[in-house]
Image: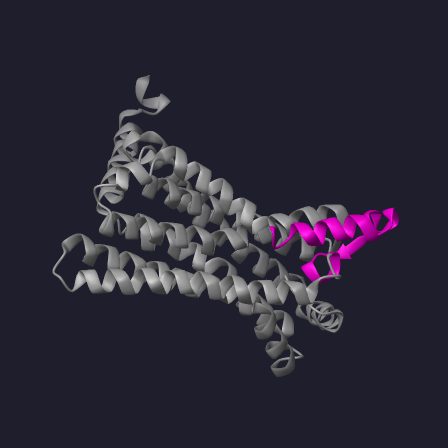
Amino acid sequence: MNLSSNNITVVTASRSREGVYIAAAKNVIVVALFVSINYINGTLVHTFSKHQIFSMNPRYILFIHMVLNDMLQLTVSVLLFVLSYVFFSINACICGSLVTLAALTTQNTPLNLVCMATECFVAVFLPLRHAQLCTVRRTYTLIGLIWLVSSAAIIPDVLIALATEPLEYFLSRVFCVRDNIFPKLIKKVHVYNIVFLVLVWLVLFYVYVKILVAAKGANANAKKARDTVLLHAFQLLLCMLTYIAPVLKRSLFLWFPRHYANALFVCYIVIQMFPRFLSPIVYGLRDKTFRQYLKRNMLFKKIQTKSVKPLHSLK
């Protein structure tokens, strides 16, 4: 989402050399991965919505919010990818809306992980007050706060663009990257991201150390929580790939100027799609209760499919 004008020129030149078939193959790969990942995530959402045991548990509510956030982020990301090939430049208003949504969902993920780790912390150290502190209502309020905090990263850019740019700008066509549509506060974005990630890591580190100490006392719940928080840290590392993407892309521009478009494609798969693929595996399939209900749903679907006879067999 962050490319300089020089890099965009190189991307244009690289794409013009790669040919229609290679461009089509890249788009097919991206769309196929998008459908596969969102199908898996959609199955998790379906399982969550079918059973009250999950909808009344703050831990699963936060998890499914992260899944839905990943689905939304991946949808916007893939849409921007395909549009960049089909049209290259799009209307500035549409671009601004997509970039805003992409920025919001990107910021949501680390905050959601911290909230999930904090819930584990409360379950270990305040087990008697866990049900009182971590209620369903408070969980949904917390999700609202996540979106509110995330908006601080992008709303100032939107407001300044609306206040300073002429109407013609929003009617023009641009190559849809954040630096193109919101060029005024680029340094602010970098500073905000650094401060944001430092605070997130400090909270996660504190929670992990406290749970690690508790786990040494042979507390089974603490040991399970320790492993869960470790997974949160691993997921956060994957999220950080998004924040170091601008530096990585500048390096790729210097290393592979003639094959910059191909390098960006690999970078896109690793940074945008790979973490979205691991999320349901790391959390949904690892959880024993969720996995049990997921298997039931899949088995029920198979039984339903077998019980529906084809029309020709009824003759």
Query: Is residue 179 located in the magenta-colored stretch of the structure?
Result: yes
Q: Quadrant of residue 8?
A: bottom right
Where is 137 relative to 74, above or below?
A: above
Residue at x 73% of width, y 57% of height: 182
Q: Which residues are magenta?
A: 152-181
Above or below, 20 against 154 in this view is below
Q: Residue furthest top?
A: 315
Find residue 134 and report its horizontal and vertical position in percent. 33, 40
Q: Position of residue 228 (x, y in %)?
A: 28, 56
Q: Return the residue found at the far bottom.
A: 255
| Residue shown at the point (25%, 38%) measured from the top left | 293
Which residue does the image show at 71% across and 56% down from the upper left?
176
What residue is at 71 percent from the left and 72 percent from the top?
7
Residue 196 x, y percent position in the rendering: 52, 61
Residue 310 vs residue 60, the one in the foreground: 60
In the picture, measured across the screen, residue 300 lies left or right of residue 204, that is left
